[in-house]
Image (cartoon, grey):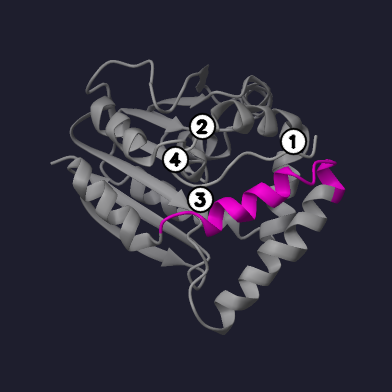
């Protein structure tokens, strides 16, 4: 497969995204480690601390993929009910294998992030780690987060913002646009997927713009950059 989905907001890309991630599922975790040099683990730990700060009883991880973040949450909050939702069955199957191997009790369920199959106000925390930029409609996704959160609940989004201006941002942009696709294509056999991924980052709203979208939904919002702005955590509280 060499085709890649369109990038950015308000795109008819759901089926293309599903097919793309299904094709790279078996190598997805390895690629994450290689392409981030292992730094993504620290980012997930920082996001998990924000997600669990209010001691939630029910947590939903949206676009959970192979469930790395859902498993991180369960390890840190063994008494919480953790559900991971994704619309790529192949990713969920790999997540279930990892959960069984680690003897962690989480539920992994197929679902559309823009039409979550859960009742209003059901969760204390909703998270999304490196999946939000793949949504076809960012505002709709945030509305669903708000809907399934209980009053006083929290949404946490961990994502790659576009590279910032300056020398480091320029170097990161070169890595993302030229080095990453070559490595990703070589390991996964899908060059299109690892061309889409950096393009999706470049098309994603900068941190303040995402914060504004969250405020427009109703969230009280704050965000912080990680590793010189390569990643960002957005926290939205439903007041």
Magenta-colored segment: predominant secondary structure: helix
Q: Position of residue 210 (x, y in %)?
A: 34, 54
Of helix, strand and loop, which one carries label 3? helix
Residue holding disc 1: 24
Q: Which residue is mark 4?
A: 128
Q: Does the stretch in magenta take in 163?
A: no
Q: Is residue 59 above or below residue 93?
A: below
Camera-nearest residue between 72 and 196:
196
Verify CB contact (< 8 Å) between mark 3 and mark 1: no
In the visual, does 223 lie left or right of 41? left
The residue depicted at 40 percent of the width and 27 percent of the height is 114
Label placed on residue 44: 3
Q: Which residue is mark 2?
A: 12
Dot 4: within a 10 Å radius of its alpha carbon, few (fewer than 14), some, or many (20 or more) residues?
Answer: many
Q: CA distance from mark 3 to mark 4?
A: 10 Å
Instruction: Tell us which disc is closer to us: 3 or 1.
Output: 1
């Amino acid at each position: 497969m060499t085709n890649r989905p369109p990038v950015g907001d308000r795109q008819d890309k759901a089926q293309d995204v599903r097919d793309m991630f299904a094709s790279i599922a078996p190598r997805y975790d390895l690629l994450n480690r290689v392409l981030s040099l292992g730094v993504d683990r620290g980012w997930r730990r920082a996001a998990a601390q924000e997600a669990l700060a209010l001691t939630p009883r029910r947590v939903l991880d949206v676009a959970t993929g192979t469930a790395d973040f859902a498993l991180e949450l369960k390890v840190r909050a063994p008494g919480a009910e953790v559900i991971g939702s994704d619309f790529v069955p192949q990713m969920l199957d790999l997540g279930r294998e990892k959960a069984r191997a680690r003897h962690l009790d989480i539920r992994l369920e197929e679902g559309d992030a823009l039409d979550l199959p859960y009742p209003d106000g059901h969760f204390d925390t909703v998270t999304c780690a490196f999946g939000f930029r793949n949504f076809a409609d960012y505002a709709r996704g945030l509305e669903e987060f708000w809907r399934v959160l209980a009053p006083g609940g929290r949404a946490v989004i961990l994502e790659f913002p576009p590279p910032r201006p300056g020398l480091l941002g320029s170097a990161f942009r070169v890595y993302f646009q030229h080095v990453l696709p070559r490595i990703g294509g070589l390991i996964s056999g899908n060059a299109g997927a690892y061309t889409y991924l950096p393009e999706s980052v470049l098309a994603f709203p900068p941190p303040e713009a995402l914060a504004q979208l969250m405020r427009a939904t109703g969230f009280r919002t704050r965000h912080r950059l990680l590793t010189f702005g390569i990643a960002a955590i957005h926290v939205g509280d439903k007041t």
